Image: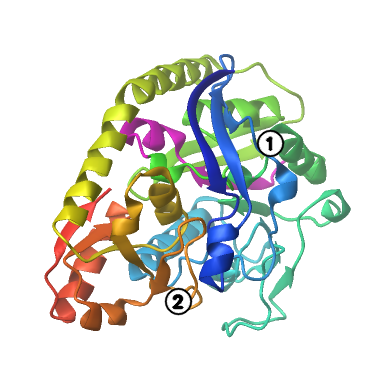
Amino acid sequence: MQIFYAVAGVPVHSVLNMVTRERALNYRRGDIRLGCCEICGFICNLSFDPTAHEYSLGYEGTQSYSPTFNTFHTRLAQQLIERYDVHNKHIIEIGCGQGEFLILLCELGGNQGIGFDPAYDSSRPRDYDPAQVKFVPDFYSEKYTQVQGDLVCCKMTLEHIAQTAEFVHMVRRSIADRLETVVFFQVPNASYILQDVAFWDIYYEHCSYFSAGSLAYLFEQSGFEVLNLMTEYDDQYLTIEAKPLASARPISAETRQAVAETRQAVNRFIEAYPSILQGWERTFERLKNEGKRVVTWGGGSKAVAFLTTLAGSDVVRYAVDVNPYRRGTFLAGVGQEIVGPEFLRTYQPDVVIIMNPIYCDEIQRTLHEMGLAPQVLTV
């Protein structure tokens, strides 16, 4: 594999809640060395160590406190239900987080669902019918393959798995001869990362990266027919819908062409990355010299990757997040405290760096409602 991006000493978790600054600064670190396969276009961290992770209570990846995200989530659930007539069916969600999407699918379609996630927190308040939706606080594995579903969902989970082919083959085995089963996977879109040179979207938890070509290649190789392959959420997410095949087929010509495009995108990333990195470091140096009060809006993985990669990131004093379960904790690796938006009324920042451009309108409205008018920068 061609190594095209490397960064040393990054925290191995970026959204595991760090309850003290000391823990955040001293948390275990690892290296990232991204390589791209010349045959299938798959990108992975060749230095990844799966034993470094602790997916459990305190792993806080919930995005449902954002109205922008909730609108997207609801629309996505409605589209799946309508496209595949998912009414009065059984649904499995692998890596369900706190269950928001599974609950939506079950409520909107009158379905029964079961979700698997080791970080599922049963103590959190949520409105759902426990006779309709059940949760298993565990990794999905071979011991659960006897659980059958008409729709199998896996959102923002495959990128955390190193042995992706083994995992997707396991899903195919679990379906067996139920050839009408629909499989839906969602992952970060590697093409978006490569095109925008978005190094802030590269972090240790994400050991596997997919473009349209490599994702289609994986599913075709694993015994699925790809029904739909598209980008969502301003091209940040890549989704695939597929059905199992009775017998394997050759990799399609369209998939092979998409793989070639990924390799070209990697080469463009290599050329552009140094200037993008230096540009942000110059910005940080200027803000520090001018004595500006700077915050990031976003206290998750993007902020951790952004700040741990850049020199001079100590100019950023706080990270703002709308998720109440993150407030009062600290960014892994760099130690900035995570605060809620209301904190800014007192802090009066000069500069707000928005870590995801899709939330710009939502954040600008919040700042305006608080009577604040800082300079806004967007990655």
Residue drawn where x is 37% and y is 62% of the image: 298
Q: Give the residue pinned by disc 2.
A: 327
Labels 2 and 1: the sequence-earlier one: 1
Q: Position of residue 352 (x, y in %)?
A: 23, 62
Residue 256 - label: none
Quarter where residue 140 is shown? bottom right
User: Is 241 rendered above or below residue 233?
Assistant: above
Q: Is residue 185 magenta?
A: yes
- Horizontal side of residue 67 vs 107, given as left or right: left
Label 2 SS: loop
- Horizontal side of residue 115 vs 337, given as left or right: right
- Name the residue nearer the viewer: 87 or 213: 213
The part of the chain drawn in magenta is 179-198
Label 1 sits on what residue type?
Answer: Thr
Q: Position of residue 19 (x, y in %)?
A: 56, 73
Q: Position of residue 357 (x, y in %)?
A: 28, 53
Q: Residues within 10 Å of mark 2 (few under 14, many from 20)?
A: some
Q: Is residue 242 visible?
A: yes
2 or 1: mark nearer the eye: 2
Residue 164 - label: 1
Residue drawn where x is 39% and y is 60% of the image: 72
Q: Position of residue 308 (x, y in %)?
A: 44, 49
Label 2 sits on what residue type?
Answer: Arg
The N terminus lies in quadrant: top right
Q: Residues within 10 Å of mark 1 (few under 14, many from 20)?
A: some
User: Is 259 rendered above or below residue 142?
Assistant: above
Label 1 SS: helix
User: Is 258 rendered above or below residue 197?
Assistant: above
User: Is 274 rendered above or below residue 198?
Assistant: above
